[in-house]
Amino acid sequence: MTTQASSETSRPARRELANAIRALAMDAVQQANSGHPGMPMGMADIAEVLWNDFMQHNPSNPEWPNRDRFVLSNGHGSMLLYATAHLSGYALGMDEIRNFRQLGARTAGHPERDHAIGIETTTGPLGQGIANAVGMALAEKILAARFNRPDFPIVDHHTYVFLGDGCMMEGISHEVCSLAGTLGLGKLICLYDDNSISIDGGTSGWFTDDTPERFRAYGWQVIPEVDGHDAAALHDAITEARKNTDQPALICCKTVIGFGSPKLQGTAATHGAPLGAEEIAAVRAELNWSSPPFEIPQEIAAAWDAREAGAGHEQQWQTLMDAYTETWPELAAEFHRRVKGDLPEGWSTHADAAIKAAAQEGASIATRKASLGALNALAAELPELVGGSADLTGSNLTRHSTSVPVSAEDADGNYLYFGVREFGMVAILNGLTLHGGFIPYGGTFLTFADYARNALRMAALMQIQNISVFTHDSIGLGEDGPTHQPVEHVASLQVMPNMCVWRPCDAVETMVAWRDAIERRDGPTSLILTRQTLPHQQRTDEQLAQIARGGYVLHGSGTPHLILMATGSEVAVAMNAAKLLESGGRSVRVVSMPSVSLFLKQDAEYQEAVLPSSVKCRVAIEAGATGLWYRLTGLEGRVIGMDCFGESAPAPQLFEKFGFTAEQVAEVAAECFAGF
């Protein structure tokens, strides 16, 4: 790729530059015999104006902290993003474009997070891209409030989003765009592909919302009826949006899906299928594009190349950053630490002390309250820890002693009131992580993990940090009844690849769980916490150290007759059942399993030490779905759990009804033992 032309007069026409996107998109989809050419062809003119007139980024250094962020929320149009990445100079060669949607290629069917080629987030499930972008814009606003000083705007960038009718129809767009307006995210600019087409055809039969009025009601700046194929009109609209730093902006771009296709443009036929060789030839004639597939004329490649301009943008910022470092050295050091994702100096010593203090205190406490204690002990040392609750602050206990709410007027805080927006909350937290500079957490009842599930899945898929505080974890929440009593939820989270699940039994395990969640940077963590009070469990120093391995021997020595294993509130039940069984002359081992996820990652030697293969009588106890426990009990063992929904009653009555008293567990264990 050649360098950018030095004279505007020598540049190709804007439509020619946009047609490079159209050509790459239709050719790549045709070669793959799979994909979505219509959106890239329809939004190509918008992309050309945004990338060539406004985007501040450096393809030679994709990690530059003050780069503009771009999110393709309508991720099925992935070839638009791959085309702009290739054309502007990222390390995405034409071979990758040729291998679109093929095994091992970086050009997957939907964009997958890859900073090296300018992909900020994984998109595809519609609506989550705009939700991630709200998190990114929120991150920019909080960091700017924290670190910027007069004459030193070191955090000063925009978040741009492409989104379509599908994103608008998904409910998550309401959740996050409503909150974005409330928080005044003025650096968020969304370009809406208003083409009135979805997979089933023209949307007039199922999507007739007055979208501009909807967004005005959210408190957004709305720029309606912009011709999405008029470069001058698009330039003016984005310029207008950038001037307003108090409100997020929605630019409604009227476009034609599959623009340039004589027979198919404006129809759903271009949405998710190749155009076909005959129609592609017709497009080439219509657009006056004579280059063969996967070839870009030199003058067009030169005009698109953003590497020289990008290096200039970064150097200008670096000059500012150097002066900032001289004037505010401590702030500069803290900014760089947070951007790099390093934990503060002395973190490990502080966390060790907090765990030991919890062990020495020996309090009987609900683990949701123990979680607040962990936040109080750890958050003061972690200014990057930012989170909140989906309208359950007083129940989830997510607001710690050093919490400061974030608002439109004052963003220099660390606590977020998300309102009743579980799905939006987790997706926004993903955006905070993706932006950088934060460790995010959010709280709700465990039963509402269902609402947030797809955003949790995206965090796991992207292998990014996101801490979920899920309280009211079982039938133990009592009288609210089966609508609020999670049964299958712990198991459903455990089967999600790369999700780490913790269900601690007391304050000590809760503190260890929080530490692990904070230190884990390659995936999300779910903390499963009780409403009811749980007793403290005594441990040796060796046992204390073994908590971090996910499972350990809490009670018993030597080779036992039988093993009781449990998590959360059921650990105390197992301990009491062990006493009953031991009074009858049986040797019992109790294994606390606060994180089955982590225990299963331990080496075989450690797993054998905790669960000796010679001991076949094993009983697992958890007030949740039973199926996954047979991995640890074996088919000969027993699992005491919940394979039905609960009822509305006080918790003690429910535990007795469903078999979770010490006497009932001891009876099942005795039956198991008698069978060997």
Image (spheres, rainbow, N blue to C red):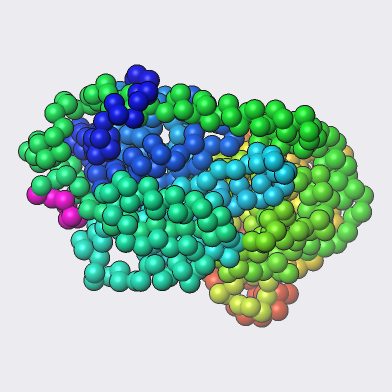
Q: Which residues are magenta?
A: 263-269
Q: What is the quadrant of residue 78 in the picture?
A: top left
Q: Residue furthest top?
A: 2
Report whether residue 674 is seen.
no
In-front residue for pair 394/23:
23
What is the x, y in percent for residue 536?
Answer: 85, 57
The residue at 50%/68% (across/down) is 218
What is the x, y in percent for residue 464?
Answer: 57, 42
The residue at 41%/39% (across/down) is 53
Q: Is residue 268 magenta?
A: yes
In-front residue for pair 523/494:
523
The residue at 13%/50% (across/down) is 264
Report whether residue 546 is seen.
yes
Please indicate whether residue 475 sits to the left or right of residue 330 in the image. Answer: left
Please indicate whether residue 75 sits to the left or right of residue 268 in the image. Answer: right
Q: Is residue 282 magenta?
A: no
